[in-house]
Amino acid sequence: MREAAEGSARPALASLEDLAQLLALWRPGAYAKEREQAYLTARFGSQAPALLHPSLAPIPAATGGELLYADQVVEAVRLFGFSHAWAGRYRRALATGRRAERYAMERELKDAARLRRWNDEQINSILALLQEHAGYLYAHGHALALAHHVFRQACLKLDPASASAFFAEVLNNGGSAHYGLGAAVEEARQWGILILPPCVNRSSDRFAVVDPDSIELMAVAAQAGAPSGGIRVPLTTIRGLGADTVRHILQMRAVFGPFTSLLDFLRRMEAHQISRRELQVLIHSGAFSFTGRSRAQLALVEEIYASAGELLRATDRDPADVGPLEDELPDLL
């Protein structure tokens, strides 16, 4: 575990509560940089936080002197003798921007604070502090639940047995919320996950974990060392390939089995189901690498194969004749 900055010997994340506090500090986006730095300095450094009033000290004591949870706003209001229901209503008025209700409640709050010998500067400071976090704070239970989820996701990411499944789900959800799909793909590669190109026989409409015993992964292991796992790119991510075309490809494969060749693919896929441009996109993306022919070879004979496919459909020839025809065509060029 990484040690905290500024000479502190305490790990930055020693418990689930520590992680919950950092998530509550960063995720909702309520804090300005100075507030964030004040929390980090008080939590992991040596500087004690400044207090608005001694009676307020127990509430933020466990969170670096800062209000991190919505529950703490309610606790702060209850210091002035109000019920939990009243304090909760005030917090909701802050969060929803109901100004008239908030102003009326703040007048009551100021009167109660003066009775407890708070001066005007302290009262204005506590009100400003509460207003600063209006609508931005997590409930403590919410932060803990999120921390548990984040910790579990981190464990899945670190475990080689589950890393591929973890990154596949990240990619299926559009990648990282902050960095997008491209950054998620690059991170997967950095963790040793092999990103396999799309394939008309193996890809689906989602990123999928590749069998660790597959021939492709074994070939990579023989050439460049064993990867941590593999993920197959879906057909839906190919730019220039329409959703209807992807659906037809998957339907044809599901009904009649894997495609045996480019010619077999064109025999099944009629002209109105896939355009020539889409076919070229598939070829250049490596979706026919299972044929053993290079992309240049396939691109060269693509138009001839398309015509042959039309001929086979028109004459309803025996599909068993497709294989020899494909072997002969490249030799004629």
Image (tube, grey):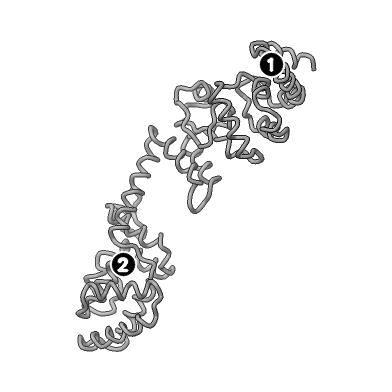
Which residue position is annotated with label 2?
A: 70
Q: Are marks 2 and 1 in contact (CB under 8 Å)?
A: no
Residue 47 sits above or below residue 178 on the image: below
| Whole-percent x, y for residue 195 in the image | 53, 34
Dot 1 amino acid type? Asp
Which residue position is annotated with label 1?
A: 316
Question: Nearest the camera: 144 or 19?
Answer: 144
Residue 160 sits above or below residue 84 on the image: above
Mark 2 element type = helix
Label 1 crowd (10 A; few <14 / some 14-19 / many >=20): few
Mark 1 element type = loop
Dot 2 amino acid type? Ala
| Whole-percent x, y for residue 147 in the image | 33, 52
Residue at the farthest front position? 315
Label 2 crowd (10 A; few <14 / some 14-19 / many >=20): many
Q: Nearer the viewer, mark 2 or mark 1?
A: 1
The residue lying at 71 percent from left, 18 percent from top is 312
The residue lying at 55 percent from left, 35 percent from top is 234
Q: Is 53 situated left or right of 194 in this image?
A: left
